[in-house]
Amino acid sequence: HLVKNENLPAKAFDAFDVGFLTDSNFLNAEIQPESLDKIAKFFDELGPNTVAIVTGFIGKDINGEITTLGRGGSDLTATTIGAAISASEVQVWKDVDGILSTDPRVVKRAIPVPSVTYTEAAEMAYFGAKVLHPVAMMPAMKNRITVRVKNSYNPTHPGTKILPERKLSDDSPVTAISVKRNVQLVDIVSTRMLGAYGFLAEVFKIFARHQVSVDMIATSEVSISLTLDSVACSESTVCTLKTDLDTIANTSFQNGKSIVSLVSNQTRSSMILGKAANALAENGIQIQMVSQGAAKFNIGFVLDNEEANKAVEVLHDVFFGH
């Protein structure tokens, strides 16, 4: 198309011929650090007079076997090339007008967000937003390169800029609302006496042994509430995990939960938390767990799956208007 219709000197390349070297984890391969120098050398030798069209999502390991990069692999290919050649901006083209205030399938009034930070975008992606996978942003974050999310079906729209930092607005304290569905809520209550040390360490040692990662967590001295991704954690793993946890605590596992997350201005987190909790209570929505990340960018509420959409609509009305 570029050669015939646009009269541009374009040429196609496979990513592994450009310099993408990965490990041998074939379905979820990681790009090796030396790839950046190889990619930079390739483009230096290619020169400025050829438009390179590079396949995404693939690479080769040290044995020359083709590998795939896993979820977000095509976007990761783009940001890795951008980092290698010190690009001022990497554009990622999707089917929406950049990052939206929430899922437009849930709230039709969802609006585009002009700019977010890497941290905000990563929190949104991890807790349900589908625009960019956090892994795909890592090369841009390390090299402080702007990533712009654009719409292939609406190319004149400016999209959303993902930046190292941005000025936060007091008038718009919430950047976006995301939902992660079908999580498990786990309550762990110590059977030891109050004041016994080492309980948290033992709990997380068990999780590490079973290679289970935690989404959200809230703790006290003798109890822990946390969430697990049901997709990433099989039923058999949950059974053995519960058996081990039951040796040190009373545990309960509840399915069918959702995490509704507010990515927000950390300096206004107390106000946002209070306003959101009041709005949910006024609409009869029961909060079963609340957690806030260390960076204070993310406030998460655990609810029943059946109440998640209503919660998003209520919170969107509160923070973005009708």
Image (tube, rainbow, N blue to C red):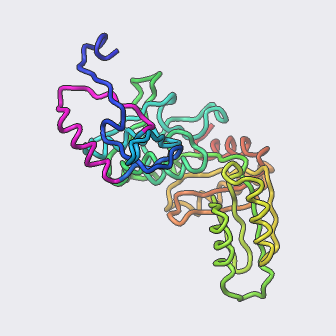
Residue 115 among magenta residues: no
Picture quadrant of residue 86: top left
Does 142 sit left or right of 277 as displayed?
Answer: left
- Image quarter where the C terminus lies is top right
**Residue 125: horizontal and vertical position, in percent?**
54, 47
Does 158 sit left or right of 191 as displayed?
Answer: left
Observer-nearest of 66 and 151: 66
Q: Is residue 52 visible?
A: yes
**Residue 228: horizontal and vertical position, in percent?**
69, 57
**Which residue ends up furthest to the front in the rendered image?**
63
Picture quadrant of residue 7: top left
Residue 48 among magenta residues: yes
Observer-nearest of 231 and 19: 19
Compared to residue 59, the image places residue 95 above or below, namely above
**Residue 1: horizontal and vertical position, in percent?**
35, 14
Does 21 sit left or right of 41 as displayed?
Answer: right
**Which region of the structure is painted magenta?**
33-58
Q: Is residue 171 visible?
A: no
**Residue 75: horizontal and vertical position, in percent?**
43, 39
Compared to residue 11, the image places residue 168 above or below, namely below
Which residue is drawn at the image coordinates 65% and 72% (left, top)? 204
Looking at the rendered structure, the number of numbered marks drawn on it comes to 0
**Which residue ends up furthest to the top in the rendered image?**
5
Picture quadrant of residue 253: bottom right
Which residue is drawn at the image coordinates 47% and 35% (left, top)? 98
Which residue is drawn at the image coordinates 63% and 62% (left, top)? 211
Compared to residue 247, the image places residue 127 above or below, namely above
